[in-house]
Image (tube, rainbow, N blue to C red):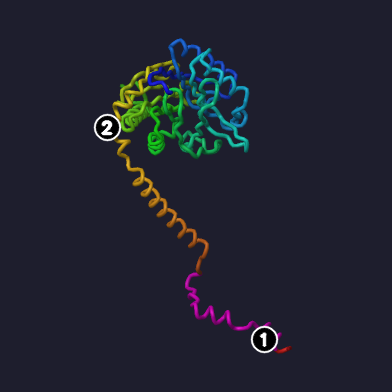
Amino acid sequence: MARAEFTVAVAQVSPRLGDLDTNLTIYEAQARAARGLGADVLVFPELSLTGYFLKDMVSTVALRLDAPEIKRLAALSRGKAGPTGVIAGIVEETDDYQFYNSAVYFENGAIVHVHRKAYLPTYGLFDEGRYFARGDRIRSFDTGFGRSAMLICEDMWHPSTVYLAALDHAVTVFCPSTSPLRGITDGQPQDNNARYWEQLNAVYAQTFSLFIVYANRVGFEDGVGFWGGSEIVDPNGVRLAKAKYYDEDLIAAQINLKTARRQRVVSPLLRDENLDLTINELLRIRGRDLEASTRAALARAVPRAAGRPRRTAAKTARRTAEPTPRARRVARSR
């Protein structure tokens, strides 16, 4: 039976690039501190076990899910040295040697769920598509603290991901992030990127009646700064806890799932969602795009010389029926 009330904490840290041992030590220290706050679930930022701008180090710091480092992370969720739920940001290596930007949810010493980042930004200062394989599913999952989903940073910039998580009965969405500082406006306490994220989190929380737990990092890598500002937002769009901008921090807030229930009673948007309508229209749009791409592919595969007359069916049939010169010689020799 899931608990209706629990405390969630966010560890806003500055990991050391490529240094698993140092970052594991940071994880363990944050877990002890979170336990002091009475946290039941502790969320770390995206790739916080490895650092973000890994480039060719991806394969060096990647971990299989049976690696010793994963066992150390699992131990943090046994409730003795920290919370009973922990979300870690890692580079995951699979049996077929694919590397994923993954978030792992541990509970009571075991892996409950792994989310592989589905949308890999490869524009501007981002180059994830060059180094990581792309995740291919969005799934909610059951925990001791209600049904939840994990989405990693850029995933949240695509509304379909939160929509899918909500339709899959998530009540809490955890978002580990590594969001850089971009666009400074005079007189504002945060950069433009931070303001966009804050608006996004509030809109998603209210629209889908969700708790949004956003865990961002701080520090610098390759000259790029990260703005922090992690937050916990309730289904009314109310900010329950807010971390500092640009500095390390540890925040916590109590979550009461009955808040989501009340919001869904008042605003039953998810209940009234017409899933068949959405599926049918997506299939129509996808079919139209496939038809257009198929026509274009056929046109490229069968080019016609300019000005060359088309061969009619009658001409083709007549040429096929007529014997070849070799066939005529063979017939005469008989």
Q: Residue 70 is drawn in which quadrant?
A: top right
Q: Which residues are magenta?
A: 305-331
Residue 267 marker: 2
Q: Please, what is the three-letter code of the amino acid marked with disc 1?
A: Arg
Would residue 287 appear left or right of 99 to someone viewing this image? left
Q: Is residue 230 above or below residue 34?
A: below
Q: Residue at x 28, y 30 (%)?
A: 265
Q: Position of residue 223 (x, y in %)?
A: 49, 25
Q: Please, what is the three-letter code of the amino acid marked with disc 2?
A: Ser
The residue pinned by badge 1 equals 328
Which of the two marks, 1 or 2, is nearer to us in this view? Answer: 2
Q: Residue furthest front?
A: 1
Q: Position of residue 238 (x, y in %)?
A: 31, 23
Q: Is residue 47 above or below residue 330?
A: above
Q: Is residue 222 visible?
A: no
Q: CA distance from mark 1 to mark 2?
A: 85 Å
Q: Secondary structure at mark 1?
A: helix
Q: Nearer the viewer, residue 232 or 129?
A: 232
Residue 186 magenta-drawn? no
Q: Which quarter of the image is occupied by the C terminus?
A: bottom right
